[in-house]
Image (cartoon, rainbow, N blue to C red):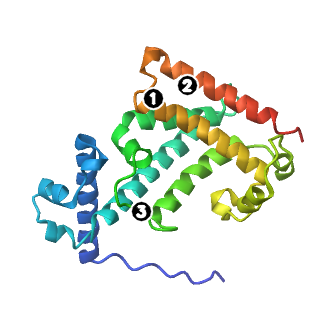
Amino acid sequence: MPADRTTPAPASLRERRRSAAVQEIVDAAEEHISRHGPAALSLRAVARGLGMTVQALYHYFPNRDALVTALIAKAYGDLSDVLQDAAGTVVEDSSTSRLEVVAEAYRGWGIAHPERFQLLYGTPLRHYAAPVEGPTTQAVRRMGAVFQRELFDGFTPAQLAAADVPALSPPLREHLRQLPSNAQGDLPPAAVSLFLSAWGHVHGLVVLEVFGHTSFIGDHQAETFRTSVRMMIEDIHRRIPAA
C-alpha cells in the first residue's frame, strides 16, 4: 500500500499577493541596476520607480541588504539555469565538450547582463555582507556544481585523487577536506585544486571581457576565449591519470 502523501495547502490570497509584490520589487531593482549600476541601488530609488513609499517597501524588504541578497541569489539562479540548459544541448558524439559549451554560456550571460554580472563579481557594495550559509551561498554552490560535474565527467574518485598537481601543504589539504559536500568537499584535495584553477581561468577571461579589458582584441574575443578554454581543459585532463 503506497505511503500517505500530504498535499501542501495552496497559498492563500494574501501570500500570493505578497509573492507578486516581492517579484515586482525585485524586477524593478534589476531594472534600476541595469540603468544605473549596482552601486546606485537603494530602497528609496526602487520605491520611487514603483510609485510607492519606501515605508511600504519595508514591509517586503526590511533593508537594502535583504534586497541585495535577493538580487544576488536570483542572478546566480538565472545563471545556473542558463548553464544547465546549455549543457543539455550537447549531443553524445559532439566534438565540443559540455564544459566548453557551459563556459561559452557563462561568457554569454556575462556579456548580455554586464550590470548583474558586476553585482556578482564587481566591486563589493559598501557595508553589504552576505548571510553566512544563506541563499547567496546556496545559489553560487548550485552554479559551481554544474562546472564541477562537466569538468570531471567520466573520471573516478581514485583518478581525481591521483591527479598531477603541485604538492599541497598539509594545512590546505585539511581545509579542503573540511569543506561542505556541496562546496567541493566531496572531491579529493587534488581535484579541488584543479577545479579552482579551471574556475579561475574561465571566470578571469569573462571578467576581463565584460569589464572591457580585452577590447583591443576586437571581434576576435569569442575565438580567443574558446581557444583558451579548450587548451585549459586539455591541460587539466592530462593531469588526471587514465583509469
Disc 3 residue type? Answer: Ala
Q: Which mark is residue 40?
A: none
| Residue at disc 3, secondary structure | loop
Q: Give the residue pinned by disc 1.
A: 209
Q: Give the residue displayed 71% in from the left and 65% down from the top.
A: 178
Circle 1: residue type:
Glu
Disc 1 and disc 2 in contact, CB within 8 angstroms: yes
**Mark 1–mark 2 distance (CA, rounded to whole Å):** 9 Å
Residue furthest right as drawn: 243
Q: Position of residue 26 (x, y in %)?
A: 28, 57
* Residue 151, percent from left and from top: 69, 41
Relative to residue 152, is residue 14 drawn left or right? left
Q: Who's the residue at 76% across and 62% down the image?
A: 174
| Residue pointed to by mark 3 | 129
Residue 217 locus on image (x, y percent): 47, 16
> In terms of sequence position, does the residue under pointer 1 or pointer 3 come before the other?
3
Residue bearing the label numbered 2 = 225
Left or right for 16, reference 171: left
